Amino acid sequence: MRFSIFLLLPLLSACLQMTPIEQSKSVKIPPALMQEIKTEVTRDFFDPASAQFRNIRLVDVTLKDGTQERRVCGEVNGKNRLGGYVGFSMFGGVVVGGDFQKRDFFSACEAW
């Protein structure tokens, strides 16, 4: 058990390292992209039509290494099988070639 933990620590620390953000600029979300984001985020939900969204943002981000990304973040709340809402949770992703791709970010949305 201890041996496996020591093997996983370097992998975990590599995943948590991110290139710092140099600058960011908010962008208006086109309606078609908004619909794509909602569809992708709720793809595995029990009742996707009942999902609630808030604080959805689209931001052009320039990283310290010069890389540019168009990032999306927000919060979503969905129903469980008993019909009750489970509470809002964060989601994130990037827009590549006009298509939303869901991703996990290791920093808060407010940072950009």
Image (tube, rainbow, N blue to C red):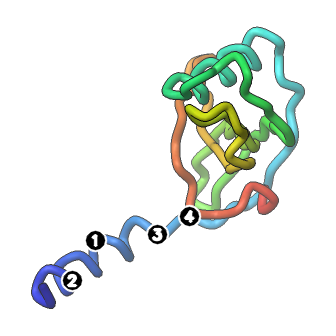
Closest to the camera, between mark 4 and mark 1, is 1
Closest to the camera, between mark 4 and mark 3, is 3
Closest to the camera, between mark 1 and mark 2, is 2
Residue found at x 64% / y 56%: 63
- Which residue does the numbered mark 2 point to in the structure image? 5
Label 4 sits on a secondary structure element that is loop
Label 3 sits on a secondary structure element that is helix
Disc 2 to disc 4: CB gap under 8 Å: no
Label 1 sits on a secondary structure element that is helix
Label 2 sits on a secondary structure element that is helix
The amino acid type, in three-letter code, at marker 4 is Thr
Residue found at x 60% / y 26%: 42
- Which residue does the numbered mark 1 point to in the structure image? 11
Residue closest to the eye, 39 or 34: 39
Q: Quadrant of the N terminus?
A: bottom left
Q: Which of marks 1 and 3 is nearer the N terminus?
A: 1
In three-dimensional space, the C-alpha distance between marks 1 and 3, rounded to whole angstroms, equals 9 Å
